[in-house]
Image: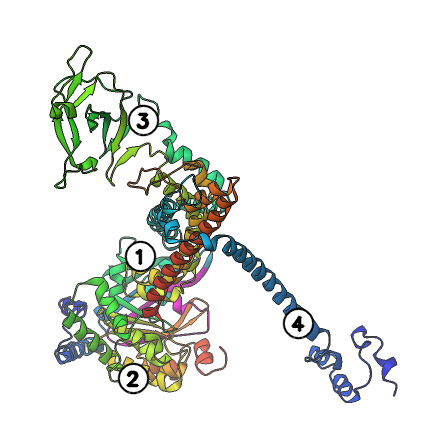
Amino acid sequence: MSVAPESTPSPESTPTPASVPASESVNRSDPGHPAGLLRQPGNRRPTGPRRSKDLYFHIVCIFVAAISIAVLSWLLFSVFRKGASWLTWDYVTSPPEPDPMTAGIFPAIWGTIAVCTLCALVTLPIGIATAILLEEFKPKTKFIAWLYGLIQLNISNLAGVPSVVYGILGLTAFVSMFGLFESDTPGQPAFELGGTSFQQYTSLSGRSIYFPVDSSSDGPPTLVDGAEAFQYSIGPDGRPIIDLGRLVPIQLNVLDPGDPYPSDQELKSRTVRHDDYGGRVHDRPWYYFRLPLGSGVLAGALTLMLVILPVVIIATQESLRGVPSTLRDGARGLGATPWQVVWNVTLPAATPGIMTGSILAMSRAIGETAPILIIAGVVYIRHVPQHFMDDFTVLPMQIYNWIDRPQEEFRNIAAAGILVLLAILLTFNAIAVLIRQLTQRPLS
Amino acid sequence: MNLDENQNAADLNPFRSGGDPDSDSTATPSAAAVTGEQDATGHAAESAIVARDLNSWYGDFQALHSISLDIPRHKVTAFIGPSGCGKSTLLRWFNRMNDTIASAHARGVLKLNDTDLLSSAVDVVDLRRRVGIVFQKANPFPKSIFENVAFGPRLHMRLSRSDLGDLVEWSLRKAVLWNEVKDRLHAPALGLSGGQQQRLCIARAIAVGPEVLLMDEPCSALDPSSTLAIEELMDELRSQYTIVIVTHNMQQASRCSDKTGFFFEGKLVEFGDTKGVFTRPEQKQTEDYVSGRFG
């Protein structure tokens, strides 16, 4: 047959051998039609380079997935091997110590929980509200539209800013508040609410005496005989109740030079030497507030808010955009106000997406180290934060602190800390996924 | 004028106590009878919606050219015409749904009773309660059947549980859906069939007690039996509601409407009694379209 010379003009048909004359004839019956090309034997579906390409791609995908799973499991395995035996109940309930054998991570756990919960409480309403404004309340004038564009541009840009930069912003905006609240005494807040300060002395009998002072004052106050001071109240068991909120008043007696040394036990217990310098203590309830915020829990939470706010806004916008406009039209057609449309229709339909975005954002906040490092620094914290202005440390900071030490044991307790961090992260995520499932159910 | 007020009283009462639907059906036919009388004389007050020289644009594109028509009260008016001829645009001006499109604007006169619909002072939220709309694609909310119907009334007023239940039942009965769903009112609405969903949307629309019901190709996604159900429903509703329906189905327009308007390229080519438009059209274009010669 003279098939081969005839088919030379078309380059596509040259690689196909003239072994299938039947289909060749089909091809020739409709030479001008593109469907004819599809019917050429070399392009039949199940064989040839297309099938092998598909196979290669499949193999590459499996390979890439395997690499990431392998790296993750290797990481988890090495952390587990180092830290698992150090992860004891004592470890999660004790404060950090200079001795790695007794050191624990309790304050850092509560620091992380406090900062991240506060961060979520601040970020989610602001972020979701911003996204609703940008998506659901479209601008009516040119100027507002321009403003919206500016906000949108900023949000997109902020999402890409390194978190250490947010740390510096947080330091300026929240910790020192641009120096707007300068007090007369350096290092003291200019404005305080709900806190009491005392100068603490030791009486001749050894009991502590608390003399109330102005929190913004510096140095010891002048003591005079007969001034009102405070002591711990004595409980029914005869021991003092260690609680600055439940002090009892006493009449202060100052032992000036030349005064006779008191012999009366009662008088001794409320007598202070005139040259006793004392020390400053503060009684701050949970609602204690000060300006500037200082490097406390609230400043940390607000700084983390800066880090995750763009993420929350963008995720919420995406899920609002995903709500079909027919639903909005349906509600509008019934006479719903714009707010009723958002609250009753759009927001419920977008909730799963918003929750997913928020979970991712919160996971990021839990693991974030750089901004906290700038806000709070590497500090030695032995107590759980008591109020919103209290000093704090978080798990990544504590881990960072330990990893930096030369002793091998500290690296092991750091590994145990990583396990705790992962556990908290997974718990947060599990709770959020659970909430998402519960909110999703009535909709579907 | 007096008559107008009476009708408004009957129609505007948004949540006529659903407790005994009979009281409504006795009240309204009498009003409809009066309407019929008035209609015979061709009185102007019989128009629910009046448009005069209405022009509308999307940005620079003019979608409607000088539309003038009167939509009769308590009748079914059908808009027919090829895609993109402006019939949906006009419909969406009747309850200002076009407000959601930033570039849409209109000039001319458009009145519902004596309210200027194009005025910026008009309260669109209240307008959309008075002028309900059913869309081409059934769009029940992802809630239960009951919640879907109760959605509208809840937006506007606080009702006791039993009143709300009565109102939902009344609306579903009106929409000829009650018997199919009465045992599963709290099942998800998205589990209903397409035709049931569309009737649910109609029930949802009439639950807020509108005066006018707009239907934007309500049957285009439905099978013939669901279409029939909705056409019967329209027949049922026409005694109490002014209905405007946009349809691509000319048989449907001829079957169930009293008046028909034929639109072409943004212009109202012909508007008149349905029988006349379909049997003795005045315009050549209309004749070509209704006889299937083009479109």
As rendered, which of B219 and B77 lies closer to the eye?
B219
Which of the labelled discs sits on residue A54, or is there none?
A: 4
Going from N to C along the chain, the mark reached first, 3 or 1, is 3
Which residue was labeled with disc 1?
Answer: A338
Query: Could you give the CA–CA distance between mark 2 and mark 1, rounded to whole angstroms?
Result: 34 Å
Q: Chain of mark 4?
A: A
Q: Secondary structure at mark 4?
A: helix
Are marks 2 and 1 in one subunit?
Answer: no
Instruction: Check whether the beta carbons of the residues at disc 4 and disc 1 lie within 8 A of each other.
Output: no
Query: Could you give the CA–CA distance between mark 4 and mark 2, rounded to whole angstroms?
Result: 55 Å
Q: Comparing marks 4 and 2, which lies closer to the viewer?
A: 4
Going from N to C along the chain, the mark reached first, 4 or 1, is 4
Q: Amino acid at mark 3?
A: Gln
Q: Which residues are magenta?
A: B62-89
Q: Chain of mark 3?
A: A
Q: Secondary structure at mark 1?
A: helix
- Res A396 visible: yes
Q: Comparing marks 3 and 1, which lies closer to the viewer?
A: 3
x%, y% of residue A385?
A: 32, 42
Q: Comparing marks 4 and 1, which lies closer to the viewer?
A: 4
Where residue B12 sits, quadrant-wise, is bottom left
Which residue was labeled with disc 2?
Answer: B232
